[in-house]
Amino acid sequence: MAGTPPAAWSNWAGNQRSTATLVARPRTVDEVAAAIRAAADAGRTIRTVGSGHSFTGTALTDGHRLELTELDTGVTVDTTRRLVTVPAGMTLHTLNDLLAAHGLALPNLGDIDAQTVAGALATGTHGTGAKLGCLSTFVTGLTLVTGTGKVLRCSADEHRDVFAAARVGLGAVGVLVEVTLRCVDAFVLRAHERPAALSAVLADLPGLVEQHDHVEFYWFPYTARVQVKTNDRVPADDRPLPRWRGWLDDEFLANTVFAGACRLGRAVPGLAPGISAVSARALTERTYTGRSDRVFCTPRRVRFVEMEYALPRAVLPAALDALRRIVDNLPFKVLFPVEVRFTAADDIWLSHGYGRDSAYLAIHQYVGMPFEPYFRAFEEVATELGGRPHWGKLHYRDGASLAPAYPRFADFLAVRDRLDPDRRFANPYLNQVLGD
C-alpha cells in the first residue's frame, strides 16, 4: 500500500475542509493496521473518511487520512439466517442493491444512501420508525483495528464492551473494516404523503406514530403547515410511482425548483416567508408503492448545513413551539423546512436513542446563509429539554455537557483509553465532544 502526497478534502456541504499530510487507501485489513502503525511512527494522527455526509469535523485531520474505498474484505450473504457481512467502506446504496439481489433488505434506512456503512454507523445514522432503532442496532458483529494496530472481532459474545462502544463509535475506538448486519426479507412499502396542519398532527401524534411503520413530517417555517409522510409494509408493489411523477416531485420540484427558490431567498431574504408558504402548498398528496430502500431514500442535491437533536418524545410539542418563536425572532430568514422523525430506544452507549424512545428534530439552513444564531438558540432549548445532538450534525456541545446526557459515557471513554491510549484517532472534534 503506497501513500499519496498531501491532499485537500471537504465534506458534502462544503463547511468542513482539511489537508492531510498523507492519504492511504488500504486494500486489506493488514494494510489498515500498517497504515495506523505508519502514522504512529511518523508521530501523526490518522482519521478515516467516508462519503463526507457529516456536517461536523469528525473526519478532519492534518495528519494521515485513511480512505476505505478500495478495502476488500469479501462479501458473505447468509440468506437463511438473514445476515450479511460486508467491507465497512461499502456505500449504503451498493449494500441495498446487494441485499435486493438476494431477496433481503435492511429493516430501516435514512433518507440518503450515499454514506459508507462505517460512516453511517459511527455517527448514529437513523431513519424513522417507532419500533426501530438507529442503523447501528442492526449490527451483529464487527471487526475493527485499534489505535495500536490490533485487529479485534467483536459481537455481543466477544469483546462485549467494545461492541457496545464501537457500534456508534465516532471513529474514536478503532477503524471499522468489516460489519455483519441483521437483515429482513425484502419488502415493499406503501408511501402516503399529504399536507396537513401542524396543530392537527401534534394533536394526534401518539396515534399517528404508533399506527404506521414509519412516520415523519416537515414543518415549513413562517407557516402552520406540514407535509406528513407515512411508510407501511404491504404485500405487493401494485402502485408504483409513475416515472414522470417521480421526476416532477423528487427531481424537478424538490431539487431544481427548490434550489432556485433558495437562491432567490438568499438574494432577497424578505421573500423567504412567501417562498415557505408556496412550498407548503406546492407539495400535494400522493400515494405509491416501491422497493423499501427506494422509498426510504431520495436524492438530495440542494446543499445545506444541519443540526439535529434527539429528544424524549413527550417534549416534542414544547420543542416545536419554542422553535417557532426562535425562527420568528431571528435577524435573518430560514429557507429550509424542519424535519421530525422517531426512533425506538436501544442499548448502544453513545447512541442518541440510548435508553429512551426519541423524537428527532432537524433544522437546516441553505448554504451561504447565516445559521449559527439559529442553531445555537435551538440547541439551548434542546439541551434544557434533555436533547442529545446527532454526532454527524452541527452542534456546540462539549464533553462536560454531553457526559450527563449519556449514562455510559464514562464506560465509552474507558474503552477508548484502552484501545487508543496514544490518541492516534484524535482530532479537534473528538477533543471537543469526548475531552482529553
Image (tube, rainbow, N blue to C red):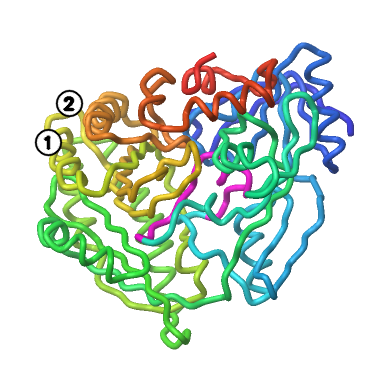
Q: Which residue is mark 2?
A: 331
266 on left or right of 18: left
Query: In the image as oriented, which residue stretches furthest toward the front?
Result: 157
Q: Is residue 69 visible?
A: yes
Q: Secondary structure at mark 1?
A: helix
Query: In the image, which residues are magenta?
Result: 113-130
Task: Identify the image quadrant of residue 201.
Answer: bottom left
249 on left or right of 204: right
Q: Of callouts 1 and 2, which one flags the residue occurring earlier in the amino acid sequence? A: 1
- Residue type beneath disc 2: Pro
Q: Is residue 343 magenta?
A: no
Instruction: Provide residue 48's location: percent of width, then percent of height.
Output: 67, 33
Closer to us: 54 or 270 = 54
Q: Which residue is mark 1?
A: 325
- Residue type beneath disc 1: Arg
Residue at the location (83% across, 41% down)? 29
Instruction: Provide residue 146's location: percent of width, then percent of height.
Output: 73, 30
Residue at the location (43% across, 62% down)? 251
Quarter that holds the C terminus: top right
372 on left or right of 70: left
Dot 1 surroundings within 10 Å: few (below 14), some, or many (20 or more)? Answer: few
Instruction: Provide residue 341's location: percent of width, then percent of height.
Output: 33, 53
**Dominant secondary structure, magenta:** loop
> Which-is-in-front pick, marks 1 and 2?
1
